[in-house]
Image (spheres, helix red, strand yellow):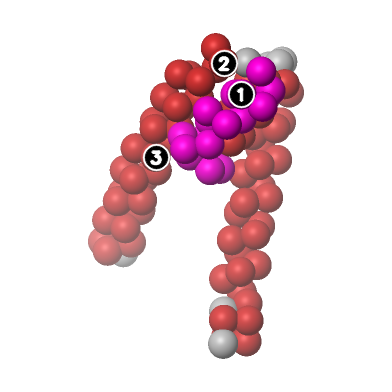
Amino acid sequence: NILENGWHIIQFMGMAWLITVLLHWFLCYLFKLDSDTVLMASVAAIYGPVFIGQIASTIDNRRLVFPGIALGLVGIALGNYVGIFVAWMLKII
């Protein structure tokens, strides 16, 4: 049912994810960030703070655990407020 009736939603979500990741990588390239920081920021942005510890131990860079978790939590908080703001604006329109 989802593939028949909701294909446009799946396409929209895929494009939104792709554009977000490409924009993130472009900004990291623009600001000349190292690969460990880019990886931690990507994981924090896409998956949240839950997987930061595992990625830090995998890349053997434990000094990025706290900044990665903090970045993930800030992203969740900002995402909630942006979502509430967008819903409020759509209600007005």
Q: Quadrant of residue 74?
A: top left
Q: Which residues are magenta?
A: 44-60
Q: Residues within 10 Å of mark 2 (few under 14, many from 20)?
A: some
The reply to whether residue 90 is in sight is yes
Nearer to us of marks 3 and 2 is: 2
Give the residue type that dot 3 points to: Ile
Give the residue type that dot 1 points to: Ser
Q: Residues within 10 Å of mark 3 (few under 14, many from 20)?
A: some
Q: Label 2, label 1: how many angstroms apart (C-alpha)?
A: 6 Å
Q: Label 3, label 2: how many angstroms apart (C-alpha)?
A: 22 Å
Q: Taken as a whole, is the magenta stretch helix, strand or loop?
A: helix
Locate residue 71, reporting x and y percent: 46, 27
In the structure shown, which secondary structural element does the residue marked by tag 3 occupy?
helix
Residue at the (60%, 24%) spot, across then down: 56
Locate residue 44, reporting x and y percent: 53, 34
In the structure shown, which secondary structural element does the residue marked by tag 1 occupy?
helix
Disc 2 designates what residue?
Answer: 62
- For the N terminus, which image quadrant? bottom right
| Residue contact between numbered discs 2 and 1, judged by CB atoms under 8 Å | yes
Residue at the (60%, 54%) spot, across then down: 16
The question of residue 1 being in magenta is answered with no
Residue at the (62%, 51%) spot, across then down: 17
Work out whether mark 2 precedes mark 1 in sequence or the reverse, and give the earlier one.
1
Q: Tag on residue 20? A: none
Disc 3 designates what residue?
Answer: 76
| Residue contact between numbered discs 3 and 2, judged by CB atoms under 8 Å | no
- For the C terminus, which image quadrant? bottom left
Give the residue type that dot 2 points to: Arg
Q: Label 3, label 1: how many angstroms apart (C-alpha)?
A: 23 Å
Disc 1 designates what residue?
Answer: 57
